[in-house]
Amino acid sequence: MENGWGWSAGIFLEDHWKPKIHQIIELNYYGLKSDVFLQKNPLTPGGYGSGNQPVYGDFDNTKFNQIAISGGIKYLLNNTLFVYPAFEIGYSLNPDIDINKTVFSVKLGLGVDIRGVDIILEYDYGLNYQRMVYDITVPFASTHRNSYLQLKAQVPVFNLRK
């Protein structure tokens, strides 16, 4: 699988729980895509792979769309810098996923607050695998784990009213 691309959109709620700790709840839609190359593993008479793995199928722009809710904290390091650890539960919207449509992941972000707008570089690591059937005529399936790095901006709604 090659690194793909994607986008996300969502809403978030931020509660100023303590002076340096803010609780955050997010609801996001992720539109992720990646190119997938499936390979055959031919066996030799001894039962071991020959090392020659021809490409079985080339599935370009395979979708890994999901909707997710996450909860975490924004821990302020100073007036502008913060770290953002979170836990996320997502549900795959791809009909070809047949095992583990519900996914769990952990997120860790480093951000900066610029005039009330949070700019966050965030890494999302999937905790479980999903299985996808790529070709129902074979049937041929493969497992994958969604992990990605994203740069996002969070703009509070009250800032838009000014």
Image (cartoon, rainbow, N blue to C red):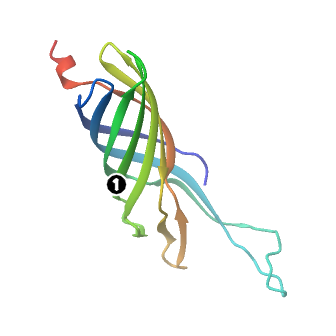
Q: Position of residue 61 (x, y in %)?
A: 50, 51
In the image, 77 versus 106, the foreground residue is 77
Q: Position of residue 126 (x, y in %)?
A: 47, 54
Q: Position of residue 108 (x, y in %)?
A: 46, 39
Residue at 82% from the left image edge and 69% from the top image edge: 51
Mark 1 surroundings within 10 Å by alpha-carbon count, few (fewer than 14), some (14 through 19), many (20 or more):
some
Task: Please identify the quarter of the rendering in which residue 26 is found.
Answer: top left
Residue 64's place in the image compared with 27, above or below, is: below
Please indicate whether residue 47 sits to the left or right of residue 36 in the image. right
Q: How many marks?
A: 1
Farthest bottom residue in view: 45
Residue at 47% from the left image edge and 62% from the top image edge: 128
> Helix or strand or loop: what does disc 1 sit on?
strand
Residue 126's place in the image compared with 113, above or below, is: below
Q: Which residue carries the number 1 mark?
A: 89
Farthest left residue in view: 161
Residue 52's place in the image compared with 161, above or below, is: below
Task: Please identify the quarter of the rendering in which residue 98 is found.
Answer: bottom left
Residue at 81% from the left image edge and 68% from the top image edge: 52
Amino acid, disc 1: Ile
Residue at 69% from the left image edge and 72% from the top image edge: 40
